Every structure is written in C-alpha cells, then in structure tokens.
Image: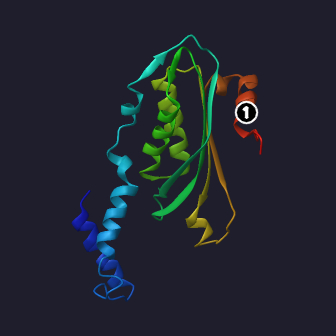
Amino acid sequence: MDSERIERAVREILLAIGEDPDREGLCETPKRMASMYAELFSGMKDDPRRHMKQVFQEKYDEMVIVRDISFNSMCEHHLMPFFGKAHLAYLSAGKLIGISKLARVVETYALRPQIQERMTCQIADFLYEQLDALGVAVVLEATHTCMTIRGIKKPGSLVVTSALRGRFRQDLGSRNEVLSLLHQEYGR
C-alpha cells in the first residue's frame, strides 16, 4: 500500500472541499486515513488458503454451520462501509476445518474493496473447493452506509445475499434444510 500517495490524495480532497488541511484538527487526517486504508484493505494481500492448512480428516458426512460471523467491508462503488453477519454451512465429505478458520476466511474476503454479491460467491466457491464439500451455503446480511446515510437515506434497510453450491443448490430438500437452519432463531 502506498501510504504517501494516499496521504497526498486525502490532502487534495480536503483542499477540494474547501478545508485547510494544515489546521490543527485536520493536519494528521491524511496519515490517519492512510493507516485506516491499510487496515480496511488488508485482505487484498491476504491469501485465504493460509487458513486452510490444518484440515482434519474425520468420518463425518453431516452439516457444519456457523452463524452470525460479524464482518466489515468497504463498498467499491463509494468507498463507504457495509457491515453485517455471515452465516455459513458446509456438508462435509470427510474434511473438517476449525470453525475459527471459517471466520478468518470471511474476514479475508471482507477486507477488500467489495460488493456483497461477489463476496458471498467468493466465500462459497472457496469453501466448496478447499473442503471438497458435498455442499456449501453462504448467506450474508449487511447494512450499506452508501444507502443509509447518503443517497436514498433509508436507515434500517438490510441487504441479504446467498450462494449455494453442490447438494445445497441441486437438491431441493437439502436446500430447504440448510436455509431453514441458517435462518433459525436459536434461543432468541
């Protein structure tokens, strides 16, 4: 990441909106913005395969579900945040992964300039291929600040996307079961 270039660009933006980038409250803003972008876009240089190094062989051919994995991302259209929860399921064919690794995969894809639809498919395709799973389901629910605080200004709106692979896409019974489990309210 070219921090100096980001700092120069932020300084130019401040000038363009009629601000004084040298005044006390703004003089460190370009540096802070460069640091923030390094953090928010750290997934660009992160390979999610590094989280798949420890896969366990286990005689298990049922569903594994992890719900409510929080994430934050940046919409590539306006460079504004969107944030929400990911719900993941895979139908094992004998390969299992530590459940914290699933959250790390979500984080890797979230920390890039993104659109929610692409991110949903990237996570599903990655898990389907890496785990040789019989099926994968990914549902993302997110609030997009480009819709809630600017433009149409509709706070409370939620965008839901899904991607189904393998048996969850092909078999109606499996599809209904996984989607029901992903949306079930356990003890709430």
Q: Residue at x 51, y 54 (%)?
A: 72
Residue 109 x/y as whole percent: 45, 44
Q: Quadrant of residue 154?
A: bottom right
Q: Amino acid at mark 1?
A: Leu
**Local secondary structure at mark 1:** helix
Tell me if 181 is positioned left or right of 36 in this view.
right
Can you say which quadrant of the picture contains the C terminus?
top right
Nearer to me, 69 or 8: 69
Residue 165 x/y as whole percent: 59, 28
Q: How is the image coloured?
A: rainbow
Tell me if 13 is positioned left or right of 100 in this view.
left
Residue 176 x/y as whole percent: 75, 30
Tell me if 122 is positioned left or right of 139 in this view.
left
107 shown above or below 53: below
Nearer to me, 16 or 31: 31
Q: Residue at x 30, y 73 (%)?
A: 30
170 shown above or below 85: above
Write down the residue under mark 1. 181
Residue 102 x/y as whole percent: 51, 35
Can you say which quadrant of the picture contains the N terminus?
bottom left
Identity of the residue furthest to the top in this view: 59
How packed mark 1 is, by other alpha carbons closer than 10 Å (few <14, some 14-19, many 20 or more), is some
